[in-house]
Amino acid sequence: MIAVLVVGPRELPDDGFVRVWIDSGSTAGAEIPVPAANLTLADEDDGRGSAAVYALHARQCWR
């Protein structure tokens, strides 16, 4: 599995999807829906505010 940092609401739902912001690198980024189960609180999060920094875990697909 690979993980990328995203920003989302500090309070996550128990299941279902949540919208997070992801930096795309060369543009302004994007807001995308992801499964809440694929998010874990990142070490970079400071524990304050209504938003949190998460590691988004995604399976790597090979063709």
Image (cartoon, helix red, strand yellow):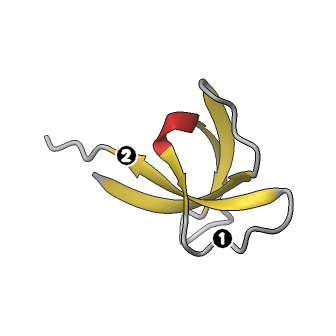
Residue 35 seen anywhere in this rendered image of the structure: no
Where residue 52 sits in the image (x, y, percent)? Answer: 71, 60
- Across and down, in percent, residue 12 comes to 70, 40
- Above/below status of 59 relative to 41: above
Mark 2 lies on residue: 58
* Circle 1: residue type: Asp
Q: Position of residue 16 (x, y in %)?
A: 60, 24
Task: Point out which mark residue 9 bears.
Answer: none
Viewer can see residue 53:
yes
Q: Nearer the viewer, residue 43 or 9?
A: 43
Q: Is residue 20 above or below residue 18?
A: below
Tell me how far mark 2 sits from mark 1, CA to CA.
Answer: 19 Å
Nearest to the observer: residue 34 or residue 54: 54
Element class at badge 1: loop
Which label is found at residue 45?
1
Q: Quick one: label 1, few (<14), some, or many (20+) residues within 10 Å?
A: some
- Residue drawn at 46 percent across, 61 percent down: 4
46 vs 41: above or below: below
Side (left or right) of 19 relative to 26: right
Q: Which residue is most to the top? A: 16
Q: Is residue 40 left or right of residue 50?
A: left
Which one is closest to the eye, mark 2 or mark 1? 1
**Image coordinates for residue 11, horizontal then vertical, percent:** 76, 44
